[in-house]
Amino acid sequence: MSVPSPRAADPTLIASLVELIRRTSTVLPDDVVRAVTAAKTGEEAGSNAAYALDVVSTNICLAKDKSQPLCQDTGSILFYIHTPVGYDQLAFAAAAETAVRQATAKGYLRQNSVDSLTGLNSGDNVGPGFPDLHFHQWDQAHVEVKLMLKGGGCENVGATYTLPNPKFGGRDLKGVENAILDCVLQAQGQGCGPGILGVGIGGDRVSGMACAKTQLLRLLDDTNAHPDLAGLEARVVQKANQSGIGPMGFGGKTTLLGCKVGALNRVPASFFVAVSYMCWAFRRQGVDLNADATIARWIY
C-alpha cells in the first residue's frame, strides 16, 4: 500500500505533530517514570537524594496534569523520521516547522532557538538546524516519527574521548568503560541527574555522537542484542551508582538511570567514544502515522 505524500499545509499532519510535541514536552514516558519510581525506593528516607527524587516525581505529575513543559529548557528539537520510498520529505519538513511554530505559540516549547552569531532569538524555534530532522527510508508502508527534546544542561556535559589514552586505557571495552565513567565523574550530577547515557563507539566525531543520541531512543529496560555491549551497559550503571554522586550531585545511590551503547565501524587510525548525556527529564516520544496522517500508535 502506498502512502500519499503530505502537503506542506496539511492540517492533519500538522495537528498530529503538534500533539507529538505537546506530549513529548509534558508527559514523561512510562519506562522513565518506572525507573525514577524504582530509584526513589532505593534511596535512604530523609536523605538529600530521596528529597531530590521526590521533587522530580512531583514535577513529573504536575507537568502531566497541567500539560505544561517538564522543564523550562525544552531543548533542542530532534525528529527521527522513517518514511516509505517516494514519500515527500520536503513537505514533511515544512509541516514540522509549522508544527514547531504552533507548539511554541501554545507554550509547549520555550522560545529556545538563538542565532549563534548575533544572539537573536528567532521567537518561534525555527532557524538553521532548528528543528533538526533526520530522515530514513524503510520497507514499511507507514511513517514513523520519533521526537527527542534534549536540554542544554545535559548536552553540555556530554563528551567525546579518543582511545588509547594513558588515563583510560586501550582500544578495548575496558578503555571504553573507563572513558564513559570519566564522563559521569566530570559531570558530578550536573546536567540534572540522575542521567541516562547514550554512547557511540567508533565512527568519526560526527557519526559517533549521532549514534550515541540514537541510542537514547531505546527503552530504558531493554537489553542490548550484543552480549558484550549489554554487559558494558550494566557495568557502567552499576559502577556509576556506586560512586556516591547521586541525584543532582547531592549524594546517594542513583547517579544513572540507564546506559545505552551502540557501535559503528571506524577507520584504523581513529577510535572515538562519544557520550551523550540525557537528564532525568528524558523527553522522547514517537508515533506511527496512518495514511491520512492521523496518529495510529504511540511508541513509548
Image (spheres, rainbow, N blue to C red):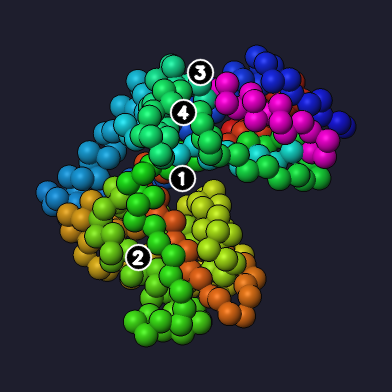
| First along the sequence among labels 2 and 3 | 3
Residue type pointed to by label 1: Asp
Residue type pointed to by label 3: Gln
Pointer 3 with pointer 4, Cβ within 8 A: no
| First along the sequence among labels 4 and 1 | 1
How far apart are labels 2 and 3 at the CA level? 37 Å
Quick one: 69 or 118, which is closer to the camera? 118
| First along the sequence among labels 2 and 1 | 1
How far apart are labels 4 and 1 at the CA level? 28 Å
Q: Is residue 136 above or below residue 96?
A: below
How far apart are labels 3 and 4 at the CA level? 10 Å
Tag 2 residue: 183
- State which region is magenta: 84-99
Q: Secondary structure at mark 3?
A: helix
Tag 4 residue: 125
Quick one: 170 or 220, which is closer to the camera? 170
Tag 1 residue: 31
Q: Secondary structure at mark 1?
A: helix
Q: Position of residue 93 (x, y in %)?
A: 65, 30
Tag 3 residue: 102
Residue type pointed to by label 2: Cys
Nearest to viewer (mark 3 / mark 4) = 4
| First along the sequence among labels 3 and 4 | 3
